[in-house]
Image (cartoon, grey):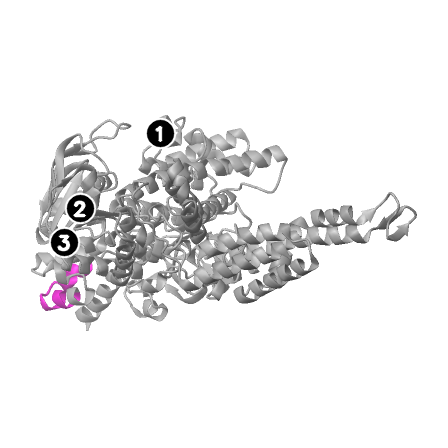
Amino acid sequence: MASHVALGAYMPGDTPMHRLDARVKLVLLLAMTVAAFCATSLLAAVLCIMSLAFCLFVSHVSPGTVARGLRPAAIVLALSFLANAVVVTGGADITIVGQVGASSAGVWRGTLAVARIVMLVGFALVVCATTMPTQMVDAASSLARPLGRLGVPVGDLAMATSIALRFIPVASDEYDRIVLAQRARGARFDEGSVRKRLSRRVSVLVPLVVSLFRRADELALAMGDRCYSGDRRTILIGPMRTVDWSVLAGGLVFTALVCLV
Amino acid sequence: MLEIKNVRFAYATSGGPALDGVSIVVRPGERIAVLGVNGSGKSTLARIANGSARPISGEVQADGERGVDLVRVVGYVRQDPTCQLVSARVFDEVCFGPANLGLKRREVVLRAHEALVRCHIEHLADKGTAELSGGQQQLVAIAGVIAMHPRYLVLDEVTSHLDPRAGEEVAALTRSLVDEGVGVLEMAHDVRSVLDATRVVVLEEGRMAWEGTPTDFLCSAKALNLSSLNADSRARAICAAVRAGANPGDCGDPDVLSTFALTHGIGRDVMGTLGQRADADVPLPRHELALEAATVCYGDVLALDAVTLAALEGVTIIAGLSGSGKTTAACALAGVIDLEDGVALLDNAPVRPGCVGLAFQRPETQLFADTVADDIAFGPRNIGLGEVEVTAAVARAAHEMGLGDDLLDRPPFSLSGGQRRRVALAGLVALDYGAYVLDEPSAGLDPVGRSRLQAFVRRLARGGASVVVVTHAVGAWLSVADHVVFLRDGRVATSCGADEAWASSAPYETVGLPVPYEVRVRELLGGGIHG
């Protein structure tokens, strides 16, 4: 019972961006975020936009997907643009009505603010679309490994995260099955007062929670059966290839350049 | 050598011992089949064998390893693959075990590749575990265990949730592992496991009730009775042949069995063991459930493609491999999913949710109310019956399912698994529907439990209801069926009367479904005896 592809979901493919090491993608995403906020000059902004266009091109992510990603933030973006651009106290470069007008400096600030969000959403979507959630968890835990020396249980956290990812489809299938069976027993989930609808959902949640606990118990046993103990696990993420190192170095130089110009 | 010596075990929550005085030895390259009805202690024994449950008394050791170290040499595969897959990606899943052993990264990857190749699923390496079929998931689970290089394997009813083709793949893989020297301890309800076994053990209420070779097992009325395999027609046919001198290992092939029966003059006997079809005892008036040009899509996937089928009277089986659209068809017939196109009809009126009874596999996991009575009353209350009528409906349904009055005020979670299943079915019949759709109702049931369920289904049909049974186990359900509809890739490939599917391979072959054992034997013997 598969549902439609969610925004920000992994899109299977074999582009250079898919093949790039997930650690490099995460580090460069972080670097580009910093760069996007440091960039103030027109040249830097153009460089950022060109690099996003390049990333979209090599990862086969359509600009439409980025537009879809921006939709929830559209109102906030519009407001922040207007707040920057519109002047209501007079002294505007471009007068609209009486005291109300727009300042060219404000328009530039507003455009920059919007462009930054577009950059962030765009790069984040590129990384999400080309990196499996499991690779992301592996990469994040590998990057966070130094924290282990400070007593942070990085391995356990990574395992918990990846199991949560694994069980999202399982839980949603189970939920669907219970809802279908109860609909066949005459339950109406979309009728009646809010209170009534909530109590209907409770009759779905009880067997769902019971079943998820049962599965959690079973899974814990199954993990024990395969010798899981939390520590001393082999780290499966391999060494980075030369090409990964080169992309990382190139990317960092590029972001530094963006910050400086 | 995996040695279980005089083991005793009890759960904290229940009174009596779950296992009492059980002793079993598994040598490398041996395969021990453990049979017994639901609740006889098989799964507990499986847990004891790999050290994940500790016996109260007695001893378990494998090649000198004991206690928590047993898991390093004894691998364990469960019946429900969704409960044992840890990772979202197949390759990571297979790496999980070896990585826990702390091996070098290169060794882990090497072992994972090798395990995938051994299970013939190397092409699935980059797939997500959630997008696989049940059969593929079970092969991944086995690969994940094999990658740890266990010397012994515990298999707990690993084929009970699989379609026949996937079941055969898992069985073939198990045979090749045994040939390579792995010792296998297998919990089973299926006579196939007996045929391939070195020795057979039957558990009854946690005790070893019988032990011997497959030939002795198949010749012993007591052993068959205790394991409830006497309620399985395929097992009875094989017994008849083995008693006449056939080698159990050869009886897995229905062609070999039939040839043996004909050449040894026991054709009629074997035919007799396969049973009769239920009489056409469905009275008038009766209900009719149908789909007309039903189309269902999940995203880009066309799950049902203009399916037209009719469950005219009595019991209709919907058969097909995993992914053929059976469960979607079941939901569409019950009116609980939206159709892209087409319509579901009950007695020529569109089906609304709540008009057709629907139960999925293991309905007992869906109980939720505080008391048994409230759970059964859920449907009647939803359709707005008064309290007096609700009480009457609950009493009738409880009586129908053999639930005593003393159980009605108890919380469902305090009951045994078998009782819970009956509560769930009572909740279904409480609404007195004109039609019922049951999705894999007999998965995981022992043969006696399955026969009881079939008698219940036949009673529903005799009451005039149209009953649709979606199942992998077509051979076992034919005796109570009237019609069979075969689905393939979301379309109706063919449909026929149960009398035609009863003794002819043709309908199965047209849809690429393995021919049920009983059907093939009937076909060959029918031709041989009369021809």
Q: Which mark is residue B414?
A: 1
**Labels 3 and 1: the sequence-earlier one:** 3
Point out the image quarter for the C terminus of chain B: bottom left
Q: Name the residue beneath numbered marker 3.
A: B197
- Amino acid at circle 1: Ser
- Residue B311, horizontal then vertical, whole percent: 44, 57
- Amino acid at circle 3: Ala
- Residue A158, horizontal then vertical, whole percent: 41, 44
Q: CA distance from mark 2 to mark 1?
A: 28 Å
- Residue B399, horizontal then vertical, whole percent: 38, 34
Residue sitting at x 78%, y 52%: A105
Asked if residue A142 lies left or right of residue B335, the reply is left
As helix, strand or loop, the secondary structure at mark 1 comes to helix
As helix, strand or loop, the secondary structure at mark 3 comes to loop
Range shown magenta: B258-272
| Labels 3, 1: front one | 3
Asked if residue B196 lies left or right of residue A102, the reply is left
- Residue B164, horizontal then vertical, whole percent: 30, 59
Return the residue nearer the eye: B8 or B503: B8
Q: Name the residue beneath numbered marker 2.
A: B34
Q: CA distance from mark 3 to mark 1?
A: 37 Å
